[in-house]
Image: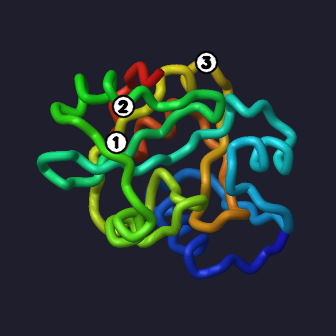
């Protein structure tokens, strides 16, 4: 792990610092882009990886952040119930435009604008979880409770 952070991870660390919590970004030499890669690098269960996925409201064209357990896929039809509209997968350009982060490193915090956020209820079973921190090889550890607090996310069923 390196001690000098890249610009994107510095932005995530600054966002975490604003919450007054002792959460530290860690960079790995290997990729943490996928949930499996992250779990392998960290040495945790895949379910403990909090995947930050950006969707787009079909009508509103607004970004929606769904943070799901690494073992789960988002059921987009079910997501319509809590999002209030059909969701579409966002392309890389849309994700970058609305978060300032590239796919594979999108964190749950530090976006350029507030984003409506939903959190997978399955993450609540863990004492600690890991989330992306701005690049495909950076993560940070936190609790599900802290994730809900810092994102102001609603806990929902995503699968």
Looking at the rendered structure, which numbered label has been put on residue 117? 1
Kindly identify which residue carries mark 2.
Answer: 76
Position of 43 relative to 92 (above/below): above
Residue at mark 1 to residue at mark 2: CA–CA distance: 14 Å
Give the residue drawn at x 50%, y 47%.
Answer: 52
Say whether marks 1 and 3 touch (CB < 8 Å): no
**In the image, is 130 to the left or to the right of 85?**
right
Kindly identify which residue carries mark 3.
Answer: 125
Which of pointers 1 and 2 lies earlier in the amino acid sequence? Answer: 2
Position of 97 relative to 149 (above/below): below
Disc 3 element = helix
Position of 3 relative to 72 (above/below): below
Say whether marks 1 and 2 touch (CB < 8 Å): no
**Tag nearer the camera, 2 or 3:** 2
In the image, 131 versus 65, the foreground residue is 65
Residue at mark 1 to residue at mark 3: CA–CA distance: 19 Å
**Tag nearer the camera, 1 or 2:** 2
Which of pointers 2 and 3 lies earlier in the amino acid sequence? Answer: 2
Which of pointers 1 and 3 lies earlier in the amino acid sequence? Answer: 1
**In the image, is 5 to the left or to the right of 81?**
right
Q: Quadrant of residue 48?
A: top right
Residue at mark 2 to residue at mark 3: CA–CA distance: 22 Å
Q: Quadrant of residue 33?
A: bottom right
Residue 42 in the image, given as x and y percentages of width and height = 82, 46
Give the residue drawn at x 66%, y 39%.
Answer: 49
Give the residue drawn at x 69%, y 49%.
Answer: 34
**In the image, is 73 to the left or to the right of 117?**
right
Residue 32 in the image, given as x and y percentages of width and height = 73, 55
Circle 1 crowding by C-alpha within 10 Å: few under 14, some 14–19, many from 20 = many
Residue 154 in the image, given as x and y percentages of width and height = 33, 30
Q: Quadrant of residue 152?
A: top left
């Amino acid at each position: 792990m390196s001690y000098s952070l890249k610009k994107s991870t510095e932005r995530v660390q600054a966002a975490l610092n604003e919450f007054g919590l002792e959460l530290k970004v860690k960079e790995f030499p290997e990729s943490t882009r996928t949930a499996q890669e992250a779990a392998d690098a960290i040495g945790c269960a895949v379910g403990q990886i909090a995947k930050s996925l950006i969707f787009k409201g079909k009508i509103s064209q607004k970004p929606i952040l769904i943070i799901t357990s690494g073992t789960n896929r988002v059921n987009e039809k079910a997501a319509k119930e809590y999002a209030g509209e059909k969701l579409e997968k966002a392309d890389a350009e849309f994700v970058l435009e609305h978060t300032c982060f590239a796919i594979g490193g999108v964190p749950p915090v530090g976006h350029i604008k507030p984003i409506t956020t939903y959190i997978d209820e399955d993450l609540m079973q863990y004492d600690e979880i890991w989330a992306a921190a701005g690049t495909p090889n950076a993560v940070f550890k936190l609790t599900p409770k802290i994730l809900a607090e810092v994102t102001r996310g609603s806990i929902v069923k995503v699968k």
